[in-house]
Image (cartoon, rainbow, N blue to C red):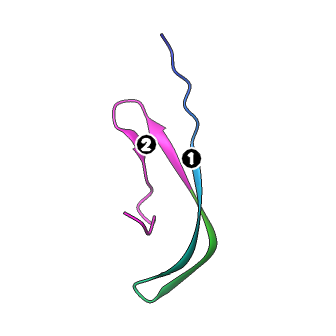
Amino acid sequence: MVFILYPLTFMVNGRKDNKTYNNQGYKINYEQKKGYQAPENYPMK
């Protein structure tokens, strides 16, 4: 059985650690053995 999973895209608004996010987009890819993995620069980890 083969599953096709699509990357997730999030838009971030707000502030964290004195940094402002204005509609900044982040793409989170799926890895077969790990699941969805957020990029290193994703602010909501």
Residues marked 2 and 1 touching at CB (< 8 Å): yes
Front-lying residue, 14 or 19: 14
Tell me where the magenta segment starts and ends, as one range.
Answer: 27-45
| Residue shown at 34% from the left, 37% from the top | 34
Q: Give the structural element (helix, strand or loop) at label 2.
A: strand
| Image position, residue 1 (x, y; %) | 47, 10
The disc, 2 or 1, on the residue closer to the chain's N-terminal end is 1
Q: Which residue is drawn at the image coordinates 51% and 15% (left, top)?
A: 2
Label placed on residue 36: 2
Residue at the image point whose x is 57% and y is 42% from the top: 7
- For residue 44, what is the image quadrant? bottom left
Q: Residues within 10 Å of mark 1 (few under 14, many from 20)?
A: few
Identify the residue under disc 1.
8
Task: Assess disc 2: are there few (<14), some (14-19) or many (≥20) residues with their C-alpha within 10 Å of its C-alpha.
Answer: some
User: CA–CA distance between discs 2 and 1?
Assistant: 8 Å
Three-letter code, disc 1: Leu
The residue shown at (43%, 42%) is: 36
Is residue 17 part of the magenta span, yes or no?
A: no
Residue 21 image point, x, y percent: 57, 78
Q: Position of residue 37 (x, y in %)?
A: 41, 47
Q: Is residue 43 magenta?
A: yes
Report the number of numbered marks.
2
| Dot 2 amino acid type | Tyr
Q: Is residue 21 left or right of residue 45?
A: right
